[in-house]
Amino acid sequence: MDRLNIKSIFLLLIISLFIQLNYQKLSFDFFLLKKGLSYIFYFSVGFAFESVREQFESINKKNLCFVFVLLTLLIFIDYKNLLFYSFPTIFIRSFWIFVLGLFSDKFLTKIYETKILKLVIRNLFNIYLFHDPLEYLVLRLFFNGRFEIYKSSLGVIFYYAVRTIGVIVFSIILGEFVRMILNSFKRNC
């Protein structure tokens, strides 16, 4: 579309929806092409949201609150997907997440100035890097057969707390430790 100088987001969404609805009819599949095509519409929706993001950033707070409450009610009413089929439901919920991000950005601006959030943002790559190995350690610790902590409700809650918050906190600690070692090497060299 770019080579043909076509800038229509709507056309992009229609084409990607058509591909996603018909990708299973392909007679070939190499390098999991079909699996990738099964997500093309969602990728296009994300691309469409990003391309119009600046227009939505200028929306005033009252209109943003109205849209947020309206979408939240719509999702709450249709929580069992009775009103909509999967595509509209996914689109509405994706748009709700987008509006939630805008809502948070407009109403929670003070949170960006806190030391904790600055620490988390500085270590986002470390969380990404260390979370997977730490997840395996948590799984090994909780499911090795000795503790059997997952057999009680409180144990399951504790497991999920360690698996989410604990892994994030430990990833940040590891990231800060690596940063400290690198700074030490830089000073000594």
Image (cartoon, rainbow, N blue to C red):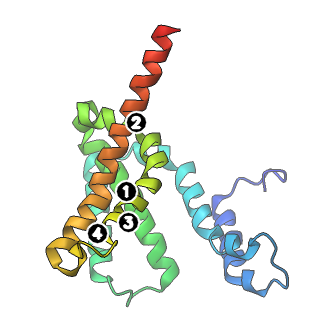
At label 1, counting other C-alpha atoms closer than 10 Å, the crowd grade (few under 14, some 14-19, many 20 or more) is: many
Residue at the location (75% across, 71% down)?
Answer: 33
Residue at x 47%, y 41% (from the top left corner)? 125
Q: Nearer the viewer, mark 2 or mark 1?
A: 2
Please identify the residue farthest to the front as the structure is shown.
146
Q: Nearer the viewer, mark 3 or mark 1?
A: 3
Q: Quadrant of the N terminus?
A: bottom right
| Type of amino acid under label 3 | Arg
For badge 4, the amino acid type reads Thr
Q: Which residue is mark 2?
A: 175
Q: Residue at x 33, y 52 (%)?
A: 167
**Among numbered discs 4 and 3, the one appearing first in the sequence:** 4
Q: Report how far apart the C-alphas of labels 2 and 1 lie in the structure.
A: 31 Å
Q: Are marks 2 and 1 in contact (CB under 8 Å)?
A: no
Who is closer to the viewer here, 100 or 139?
139
> How far is the residue under mark 4 from the one under mark 3?
38 Å
Which one is earlier in the sequence, the residue at label 4 or at label 1?
Answer: 4
Q: Which of the 4 image quarters holds residue 126?
A: top left
Q: CA distance from mark 2 to mark 3?
A: 22 Å
- The answer to whether residue 30 is left or right of residue 122 is right
> Residue under circle 3?
140
Q: Residues under labels 3 and 1: Cα distance?
A: 38 Å
Residue 185 locus on image (x, y percent): 48, 16
Where residue 76 appears, as percent x and y from the top left, is 27, 77
Q: Which residue is mark 4?
A: 72
Q: Using the numbered discs, state the Cα–Cα distance from disc 4 to disc 2 in whole angstroms.
A: 37 Å
Residues at circles 3 and 1 in contact by the CB criterion of under 8 Å: no
